[in-house]
Image (tube, rainbow, N blue to C red):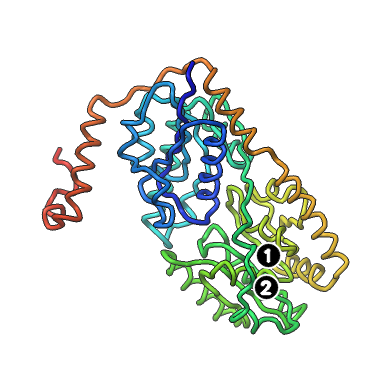
């Protein structure tokens, strides 16, 4: 049998994020192994567009012997086209946050997460293999009925942390105070309100010469940010800094200033900032939820009780005891070495080989008018930017 193409399909290819880095890493491995491999997506960061192909061209590249590696985070038009094609498929699951976290904060995302989680279950019949990028994600696929599951681990790329630190703004925090830091998008499942409560207890009862640095974008979640600012003011918490989106060089500077990385997130599929902190030598204190214990791999410090005084006491033990902090960092270095030693490329190629030689599964039925609907959707998509008045005049729902 001639070697098939192995293409990747996803909704959006981002620059510098965990999924984007994994997609590019997979492509390098496949092409180095001699596979034809393209990245089909709906949208891409302008810096990566030249590496992608429009998802609407996927049917022309389709063949029953080809393999699609489908990165699933939310349902998308690209996902549905891939579902209908005859190619073999492995689904790579990056997790979908439960929709209840976004109620009263981001209503459109409630619907998207609900529909995405519902749609995910349909792929159990479609896929030859379900891959989680953590064992926690793999277990979700297994619970949904995927007949075979495994883990394709995240192997982080730390090149964005190799630049010289930009201390222009960060230098104002280099003053001998204890810097407690969290890095991540300002979104509800990260439970940043808990981070603030824990810090408030630490600053009030253990160390008034301390501050909290919250690094992460909040675009689209201004309502949640407003709630956090209001809570901070009502508690009377001082020295809480919402730093927003920062450059890579600024991020390096903040990591170098941090004494403790504090995470209270309740839902993570992997949580890359944890291993970024390992890489930067910052002791990690994290809530033991979802994928976080497996990501930590026995390193750092996990807590299971969200009582603010208990967490504050842990912060104080780490920040005030240099010997303890050094032991934590040594364990984190060992865990990071284990992660980086994983043979990502060899594992990926083994999965591809298994799919190639496995018995073909029957393709689930596709609606008889599916491709007509795709053509209609493309037509409407083209109509929207060029004739917006005509697009807006269309009925919102088809008449019954």
Compute the Cα span from label 2 to label 1. Answer: 9 Å
Residue at label 2? 199
Q: Quadrant of the C terminus?
A: top left
Q: Earlier in the sequence, mark 2 or mark 1?
A: 2
Q: Residues within 10 Å of mark 1 (few under 14, many from 20)?
A: many
- 371 vs 205: above or below: above
What residue appears at the point 11 percent right and 53 percent down from the top-left corner? 390
* Residue 399 position in % (x across, y down): 14, 41
Label annotation for residue 262 = 1
- 179 vs 41: above or below: below
Q: Residues within 10 Å of mark 2 (few under 14, many from 20)?
A: many
* Residue nearest the observer in this picture, 379 or 293: 379
* Residue 240 position in % (x across, y down): 60, 78
* Residue nearest the observer in this picture, 13 or 301: 13
Q: Secondary structure at mark 2?
A: helix
What residue appears at the point 45 percent right and 25 percent down from the top-left corner? 88
- 265 sits left or right of 111 in the view: right
Q: Is residue 95 visible?
A: no
- 325 vs 51: above or below: below
Q: Is residue 86 visible?
A: yes
- 223 vs 28: above or below: below
**Mark 1 and mark 2 in contact (Cβ < 8 Å)?**
yes
What residue appears at the point 69 percent right and 61 percent down from the top-left corner? 277
Which residue, as the protein is rendered here, is positioned at the far right?
Answer: 323
Q: Secondary structure at mark 1?
A: strand
- 153 sits left or right of 260 in the view: left
* Residue nearest the observer in this picture, 154 or 299: 154
Comparing marks 2 and 1, which lies closer to the viewer? 1
* Residue 33 position in % (x across, y down): 56, 32
What residue appears at the point 73 percent right and 77 percent down from the top-left corner? 178
* Residue 316, image quadrant: bottom right
């Amino acid at each position: 049998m001639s070697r098939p193409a192995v293409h990747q399909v996803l909704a959006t290819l981002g620059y510098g994020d965990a999924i984007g880095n994994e997609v590019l890493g997979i492509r390098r491995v496949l092409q180095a192994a001699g596979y034809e491999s393209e990245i089909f997506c709906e949208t891409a960061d302008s810096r990566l567009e030249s590496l992608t192909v429009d998802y609407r061209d996927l049917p022309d590249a389709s063949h029953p012997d080809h393999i699609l590696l489908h990165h699933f985070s939310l349902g998308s038009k690209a996902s549905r086209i891939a579902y209908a094609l005859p190619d073999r498929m492995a689904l790579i699951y990056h997790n979908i946050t439960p929709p209840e976290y976004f109620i009263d904060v981001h209503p459109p995302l409630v619907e998207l997460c609900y529909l995405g989680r519902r749609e995910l279950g349909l792929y159990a019949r479609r896929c030859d293999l379900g891959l989680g990028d953590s064992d926690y994600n793999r277990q979700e696929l297994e619970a949904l009925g995927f007949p075979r599951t495994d883990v394709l681990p995240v192997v982080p790329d730390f090149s964005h942390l190799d630049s010289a630190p930009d201390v222009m703004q960060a230098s104002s925090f280099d003053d001998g105070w204890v810097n407690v830091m969290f890095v991540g998008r300002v979104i509800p499942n990260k439970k940043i309100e808990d981070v603030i409560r824990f810090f408030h207890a630490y600053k009030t009862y253990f160390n008034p010469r301390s501050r909290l640095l919250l690094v992460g974008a909040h675009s689209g979640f201004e309502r949640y940010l407003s709630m956090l600012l209001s809570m901070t003011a009502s508690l009377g918490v001082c020295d809480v800094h919402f730093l927003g989106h920062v450059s890579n060089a600024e991020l390096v500077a903040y990591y170098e200033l941090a004494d403790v990385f504090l995470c209270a997130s309740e839902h993570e599929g992997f949580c890359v900032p944890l291993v970024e902190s390992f890489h930067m030598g910052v002791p990690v204190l994290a809530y033991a939820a979802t994928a976080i214990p497996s990501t930590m791999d026995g390193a750092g410090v996990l807590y299971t009780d969200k009582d603010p005084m208990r967490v504050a006491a842990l912060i104080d033990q780490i920040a005030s005891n240099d010997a303890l902090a050094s032991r934590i960092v040594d364990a984190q270095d060992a865990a990071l070495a284990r992660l980086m030693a994983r043979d990502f490329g060899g594992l990926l190629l083994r999965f591809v080989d298994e799919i190639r030689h496995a018995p073909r599964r029957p393709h689930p039925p596709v609606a008889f008018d599916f491709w007509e609907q795709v053509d209609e959707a493309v037509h409407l998509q083209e109509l929207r930017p060029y004739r917006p008045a005509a697009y807006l005049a269309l009925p919102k729902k088809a008449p019954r």
